[in-house]
Amino acid sequence: MKTAIQPDEMGFYGEFGGAFVPELLRPNIEELTRAFRTAQDDKSFQADYLSLLKDYVGRPTPLYYSSKLSDTHGCAIYLKREDLNHTGAHKINNTIGQILLAKSMGKQTIVAETGAGQHGVATATTCALMDMECIVFMGEVDMARQAPNVQRMEFLGAKVIPAKSGSRTLKDATNEAIRFWINHPDAYYLIGSVVGPHPYPEMVAYFQSIISEEIQSQLKEKTGSSSPTKVIACVGGGSNAAGAFYHFYENEDVELIAVEAAGKGLNSGESAATSILGTPGVLHGSMTLLMQDAYGQVTEPYSISAGLDYPGIGPLHAHSIQTGRTKSISVSDEQALSAAKNLSRNEGILPALESAHALAALEQIELSPSDIVVVNLSGRGDKDLSTYLQHSSK
Ligand SMILES: *Cc1c(COP(=O)(O)O)cnc(C)c1O
C-alpha cells in the first residue's frame, strides 16, 4: 500500500527522493532493496530486531507525562524518552535494523560516515555487538571538534578515517564513504538518517517507526486514545522525526511539526533551516531541498547543535512539508539553549541540544487546553554539557 510515508517504485516522494547514484552502484542498491523487502516479510528477522531493541537497546522507552510543561502550556505534554536508549539517542534503532540486514546479506564490513560522531558511535556499537569490521569516515575538522566521539568509536574497535577534501566536514566524509563503497561493493553502507539514495530513506524511516508504534500504545494506555493532537520532533536529516510521525501520517487530525535549526537567525546566513532556505537539488544520491548557492554548490549550514547542521533534509520531509502535511518551524540557538536549561532545572532531564530545539517549539506554536502533545526527546545532553555551561554564565 502506498501511504504518505511510502515512496513510489523508484523511491520518489512526489518530486523528491530517487536514487541518483553512479552506474557502478546500481547493483549494490538493487541487492539492498531486495534484502530489505525480504526482511520486512521475514518473521525471524523481525523477531531478532525486536528482541535486540528490547534487551540490548532498552525499549520500549517511556512516554513521560510532564506535569510542569503541561502546567506551563495549559495542555497535556508528553515526552518520548529516546534519550534513554543505549548510547543515548534514537540512532541505535536504525543501526540495529541495518546491521541485522547486513548480516542477512552475508556482509562482513560496514562503512559509514558521521558528522558529529553520534551515528558513528551507534554504528561502532552495533558492529562490536555483531562482530563486523567497522570503517567510519569523518571530516578532519569534525574529528577535531568531536574528539571524544572519535575516541569512543576507536575504543569500540572501529577504524575512523579522516576526510581531508573540501571543507573537511560531513559532506566530504559522505563522498569518501560512497567512494569506498564503489571500490568495495562487498561492504555494507550504513546511512544514519532518512537521506541518501532509495531505499535508504524508506528503510531508515521503517526502522525508526518503532517510536510512533510505541507512542500509540502508550498513549492509549494513559489517555484511552492512541493519537495525540500534535507530534513535535527536531530535524537534521529527519530520522527521529520520521519515526515519531510514521504511524500518524494517515491521520490528518494529528498535526506533525518538524523543527529545524535557525542557528543565529533565519536571515543571518548562519542557519540550517533547510525547508525554508533550501532549494531543490541532488545531495547524497537523492533529490531534495538543500542549502546551495546560485551555482548549485552546497553551502555549509550552521547550528549550535552538531546533529542538526546537515545541508539537506530527508526527501520524505521535503515532500510532506511542501504538500502541507508537515508543518516546519525553526528555532534559534538561543531558544534551544533556554529550553534545555528549563527542562534540566524543572524536570531533571538534560536533553540533547538537538532535542532542545523540539522543546523550544512549544513556545512558538498555538496550544489549546484540549491539546495532547508528544515531544520526541531524541537524545540525552551529556555530550552538550560543555556548551550548556559556556552559555549559562552569560
Ligand atoms: C543525530 C541526532 C539528531 C538529528 O538526526 P535526525 O536524523 O534528524 O533524527 C537529532 N537528535 C539527536 C540526539 C541526534 O543524535
Image (cartoon, grey):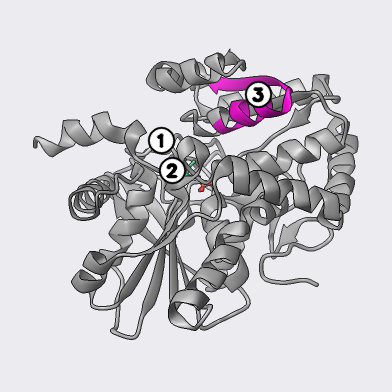
**How far, Cα to Cα, is label 3 from label 2?**
27 Å
Q: Residue 231 appears at what percent x and percent y?
A: 45, 68
Residue type for callout 2: Leu
Q: Which residue is mark 2?
A: 308
- As drawn, the residue found furthest toward the left would be 394
Pointer 3 with pointer 1, Cβ within 8 A? no
Q: Identify residue type, mark 3.
A: Ala
Does mark 3 have its CB less than 8 Å from ligand 1?
no
Q: Is mark 2 within 8 Å of ligand 1?
A: yes
Q: Are marks 2 and 1 in contact (CB under 8 Å)?
A: yes
Magenta part of the protein: which range? 122-138
Quadrant showing the N terminus: bottom right
Q: Residues within 10 Å of mark 2 (few under 14, many from 20)?
A: many
Instruction: Give the residue drawn at x 18%, y 32%.
Output: 389
For numbered disc 1, what is the local secondary structure?
A: loop
Task: Tell me the amino acid under the disc marked 1.
Answer: Ala
Q: Which residue is mark 3?
A: 128
Q: Is residue 137 magenta?
A: yes
Residue 163 in sight:
no
- Residue 364 drawn above or below residue 23: below
